[in-house]
Structure formats: structure tokens, C-alpha cells
Image (spheres, rainbow, N blue to C red):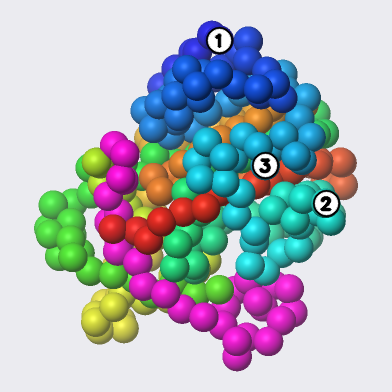
Amino acid sequence: MDVNRLSILGAEINGLDLSSDLTDSEKLVIKNHLTENLVLIVKDQNLSPKDLVKISSLWGGAFEHPVFKGLEETPEVLQIENMGEQFHTNAHWHSDVTFEQKPPNVTLLYAIEVPEEGGNTLFSNQYLAYEELDAVIKSELDDLRAVHSNKSILELVGADVSAAKTVEHPIFRTHPDSGRKAIFLTQAFVQSIVGMDPDRSSSLLEDLYKHTYREKFIYEHKWTKGDLVIWDNRCVLHYAKHGYGDARRSMLRVTTNGEVPR
């Protein structure tokens, strides 16, 4: 296994076959590298949906998405297909499924087919975003929580928004393994800051969103077929770029079970 660390965040791994059974030592190395580097790019993989479910067990097992339907034999696995740029829904900075009481800890995204141009994914380091946040703002928000809702997802799929649910999570989340704090906000899912004047809440959230994806925090991944990218939702935001028209882009996605954010 050859590991090449990237600059802002992330590490690229070569010489590892994740379709085979991993030793306990290999499992520990992979988990430690994710904790240290936030994003792992494992090159040249040939994986089935069942392989992805098996790999997810390193981080607590696969999580079945509460809204989107997965594959028939492996319902925890979502197939993400390009439907043209007008139907592109992930061109926003987010952490996956934060509207759950226990949001998924980790996301695994596997490239089956990728376009020659476009379709990159951006990742933003939320440890750095927290550390470089203005001290006055950090102090003001230190013990506050934000309201997350699945309303936008229900609207997207044409479901009844009266069934929307909300949950409160801390604005600054402490990672249980690293002990580091990260900003934990997703613009598509967050509605307000708990207990704050609505105008102040809206203004402050807008400023925070812009801060979380400053260029200095970002790594941009150019996909190749067979890439498996694994990232930690507890301290990373991601953004799916388009720019490939109606070319084919096919991915398999698995998220893992999580814990209540603290």
C-alpha cells in the first residue's frame, strides 16, 4: 500500500485491492489515514455494490438513505447517474443527510464511468474553517445549535413537505476520534440558528457558508474510472461540479451509520 498525502486535505492510496479481504492491520491503517487526512482516494478499484457495503463496515456499516431508493439487492447503495446539467442536484456545498438525528459518518463514492471533462468533486476542510473563523463569531456560536430539515429533499422528489422533519445539531462539532472541532453546517438543510433573532441568524449563516468553502480550504478531485473516494462527513463539505453536458457519469454511493453530533 502506497500512500501519498495531498496538501489541503486528502491522501491518495495505490496498491490496495478493496475487493479482497483486508487484514486487521490494513483496516486499521485505512481508518487511521481517513482520520488524519479526511479524504481518501483509493485508485484502480474493481468493486461491486456488495464490496462497497463490506468496506463500509470499517465505519459502522452501511446506512440506507431515508429518501432516495437504493439498488434492489443492496438498498444501502445508491446509483448516481448523469441526467443532463438541468437535472444536476448536488452543485452545492453540503455534508450528507445532516437532517437525521444520527447523520452518516462517512461517504464512499465509486466511479463506474466518468466523462473526459467535468464532473469533478470539491472537498472543503472544516477543521481549518473552524480554526480560521473570527474569534468573536466563534465565541458567539460556541454553544449554539442549528436546525436541519429534510424539506429541500422532499421538494426535490415531489414528496409531501408537510411530513418534513427537523433536528438540531451543534454548529461546531467535535470529532470523536481526532478530538478536533469542525464547522457543521449544510446550506441546503439548515433553516436557522436556535434561539437567535431570525434576521441575525440569516445574515450570520450566509457569512458562515461563504467562509466554509474559501479556496484555501479546498481540494478538487478529478475522477478516473475505478476511483473510490472516501470522506468524513463530520469534518468535510463536498460539492459536485457538472460541466459535462449529457456525457455519461455513473457512480455508486454508500454512506455509513453515524452518531449523534456532539
Amino acid type, callout 3: Val
What amino acid type should be assigned to the residue bearing mark 2?
Glu
Does 176 lie within the magenta span? yes
Query: Residue 73 got which mark?
Result: 2
**Residue at left 37%, top 61%?**
260
Q: Is residue 61 magenta?
A: no
Per the rendering, the mark at residue 165 is: none
Tell me if mark 1 has few (under 14), some (14-19) or many (20+) residues whose alpha carbon lies within 10 angstroms of its own. Answer: few
Of callouts 1 and 3, which one flags the residue occurring earlier in the amino acid sequence? 1
Give amino acid for label 1.
Met
| Residue 165 position in % (x across, y down) | 51, 80
CA neighbours of label 2 inside 10 A, class few (<14), some (14 to 19), many (20+): few
Image: magenta residue range = 151-178
Q: Callout 3 environment at 10 Å: few (<14), some (14 to 19), or many (20+)? A: many
Count of numbered tags: 3
**Quarter of the view holding residue 196:** bottom left
Measured from the top left, where is residue 111 in percent x and y?
A: 74, 34
The residue that mark 1 highlights is 1
Of the pair 10 and 168, the residue shown nearer to us: 168
Image quarter (top left, top right, bottom left or bottom right) of the N terminus: top right
